[in-house]
Amino acid sequence: MQRAIRLVLLIAAAGLAELSLGRPVLAEMRLLMVEQPGCTYCAEWDRTIAPIYPKTPEGAAAPLERVQLRGPYPYGYDLAERPIFTPTFILVEDGSEVGRIDGYPGEDFFWGLLGRMLRDTGNFTE
């Protein structure tokens, strides 16, 4: 009986710890898009890439997470430096930045740069 009570208390404590620490970062890849209102290159990315991104292998491997330039930034991510202009695309794996595209270089260059960053992780094949 005491063992069961200890187990219940341990599970409850773990749940409270998770709530108090915020949203945990999952062991996966994410593509952070840092944007701000009025960004014309962000609007161009939204027009050309956003509708198809979730349907691509790249989008499946690294789902998009939008972040405003002035924050707040997602809890638990370790970024090399805070972006200074938009858009900035930051590839995050297991909570750490592993690649970055500063600006939007156009559709053709974007896919090539993103593909290279994803392949460099060793966890992506097309």
Image (tube, grey):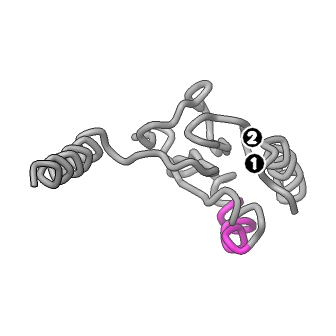
Within the magenta stretch, is there residue 53?
yes
Q: Magenta segment range?
A: 45-55
Give the vertical position of 39 relative to 77 (above or below). below
Instruction: Give x and y (percent) for residue 22.
Output: 31, 44
- Whether residue 3 sits left or right of residue 100 in the image: it is left
Of helix, strand and loop, which one carries label 1?
loop
Density class for disc 1 (Cα within 10 Å; few <14, some 14-19, many ≥20) is: some
Q: Can you tell which quarter of the image residue 34 is in?
A: top right
Density class for disc 2 (Cα within 10 Å; few <14, some 14-19, many ≥20) is: some
Within the magenta stretch, is there residue 73?
no
Q: Which residue is mark 1?
A: 104
Q: The residue under label 2 is which amino acid type?
A: Ile
Q: Residue at x 59, y 42 (%)?
A: 94
Q: Can you tell which quarter of the image residue 82 is in?
A: top right
Give the vertical position of 6 relative to 63 (above or below). above
Q: Which residue is mark 2?
A: 101
Instruction: Give x and y (percent) for residue 61.
Output: 70, 60
Q: Residue furthest front?
A: 1
